C-alpha cells in the first residue's frame, strides 16, 4: 500500500518557538494532503486541506497565520506551528491522497508535539 | 455539519468472538465511508473503503456494510484475535469527496 511518512515523530519545544512538521508521500504523488489534529481521548479534527502549488484551505476556527501550511511539491507538505503555546500540544497527523474525490486517504504515523 | 457517532465507545471480548462495531452519521450525502484502525500513539491504517454506491466491502476477517439512506455503517470482525486490539474509527467522506469526518472511535480489547 501507499506509504506516508512524517518527521519528526515527536518534538518538545519551548513556548513561543516555531515547529515545522513534514509530511511525505514516499511512493506516490499526492495531489492533495490533509492535516489533522488529535487531542487525547478525542477523534481527529481536520485542520486544513492543501493542494500542490496552491494555498491551503483552512477549517473554521483554525488560525491560518498560526498554522502555516506549504505544499510545494507532489510529495511534500509542511505544517509550521508558529509561536507555539502549551495549548497547541497535540498529536498532528497528515494524510495524502493521490487523486481527488473518492480516493483513499493514506495517513502518516503522526507527530507528537509537546510545548512546555 | 456532519456528525459521526460510534457505538460502543469501548468493547472487551474474549479471543475468537465475532463482533460488530456501529457507526451512524447525520448527513447521508456522502461519497464514501472509510473504516480505520488506530493503535495507541500511532497514525491511522485504512481498513476498508466503501463507495456510496456500494453496500459492503470485505477484506479478510473484516466486513463493512453501508446503509447510506439511514446513515449507518457497521464493521464486522470475525474470529477476533488479540492483535485486533486497537481503536476503530469510522469516517464518512463528504459531498466534496475528500473531506472526512471522524467519529470518536470504538476502543476494542480482545483478551487471549
Image (cartoon, rainbow, N blue to C red):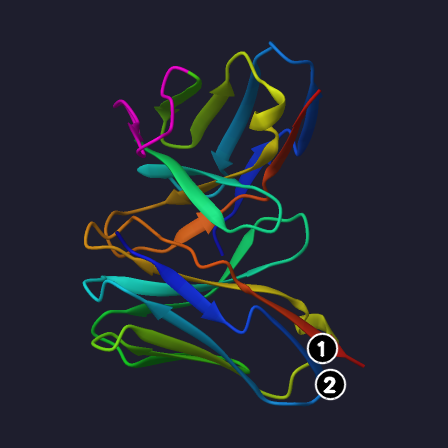
Query: Which chain is home to disc 1?
Result: B
Secondary element type, mark 2: loop
Q: From the top left corner, tell me how far across and down residue A100 is, in percent.
A: 25, 47
- For residue B110, which numbered disc appears in the image? 1
CA distance for labels 2 and 1: 6 Å
Dot 2, crowdedness within 10 Å: few (<14), some or many (≥20)? Answer: some
Q: Is residue A60 magenta?
A: yes
Q: In screen coordinates, is A85 left or right of A11?
A: left
Q: Name the residue under label 2.
A: B15
Residue nearer the viewer, B102 or A27: B102
For the point 65% across and 90% down, the residue is B17
The C terminus of chain A - image quarter: top right
Question: Are labels 2 and 1 assigned to the same chain?
Answer: yes
Position of B70 with respect to A115 (left or right) is: left
* Residue B34: x %, y % from top left: 39, 63
Q: Mark 2 lies on which chain?
A: B
Dominant secondary structure, magenta? loop
The stretch drawn in magenta includes residue A61: yes
Q: Where is residue A19 in the image (x, y as percent from the top left)?
A: 58, 17
Residue at left offset 20%, top offset 49%:
B96
Q: Earlier in the sequence, mark 2 or mark 1?
A: 2
Q: Which mark is residue A27?
A: none
Vertical order, A3 against A115 (above or below): below
Secondary structure state at the residue bearing disc 1: strand
Q: In which quarter of the image is residue A68?
A: top left
* Farthest right residue in view: B112
The residue lying toward the viewer, choosing from A36 and A55, is: A36
Q: Residues within 10 Å of mark 1 (few under 14, many from 20)?
A: some
Quadrant of residue A113 in the image? top right
Q: Residue at x 32, y 38 (%)?
A: A32
Q: Give the range drawn in magenta.
A: A52-65
* Mark 2 and mark 1 residues within 8 Å of each other at the beta carbon: yes
Amino acid at each position: 500500500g501507499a506509504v506516508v511518512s512524517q518527521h519528526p515523530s515527536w518534538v518538545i519545544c519551548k513556548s513561543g518557538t516555531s515547529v515545522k512538521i513534514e509530511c511525505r508521500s514516499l511512493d506516490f504523488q499526492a495531489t492533495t494532503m490533509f492535516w489533522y489534529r488529535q487531542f487525547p481521548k478525542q477523534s481527529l479534527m481536520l485542520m486544513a486541506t492543501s493542494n500542490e502549488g496552491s494555498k491551503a484551505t483552512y477549517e473554521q476556527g483554525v488560525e491560518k497565520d498560526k498554522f502555516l501550511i506549504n505544499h510545494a511539491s507532489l510529495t511534500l507538505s509542511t505544517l509550521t506551528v508558529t509561536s507555539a503555546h502549551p495549548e497547541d500540544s497535540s498529536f498532528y497527523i497528515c494524510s495524502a491522497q493521490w487523486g481527488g474525490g473518492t480516493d483513499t486517504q493514506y495517513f502518516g504515523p503522526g507527530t507528537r508535539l509537546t510545548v512546555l | 455539519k456532519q456528525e459521526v457517532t460510534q457505538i460502543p465507545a469501548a468493547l472487551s471480548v474474549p479471543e475468537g468472538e465475532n463482533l460488530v462495531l456501529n457507526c451512524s452519521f447525520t448527513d447521508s450525502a456522502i461519497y464514501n465511508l472509510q473504516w480505520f484502525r488506530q493503535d495507541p500513539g500511532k497514525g491511522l491504517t485504512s481498513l476498508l473503503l466503501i463507495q456510496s454506491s456500494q453496500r459492503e466491502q470485505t477484506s479478510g476477517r473484516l466486513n463493512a456494510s453501508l446503509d447510506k439512506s439511514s446513515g449507518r455503517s457497521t464493521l464486522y470482525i470475525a474470529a477476533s484475535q488479540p492483535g485486533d486490539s486497537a481503536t476503530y474509527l469510522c469516517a464518512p467522506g463528504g459531498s466534496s469527496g475528500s473531506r472526512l469526518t471522524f467519529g470518536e472511535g470504538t476502543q476494542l480489547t480482545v483478551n487471549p
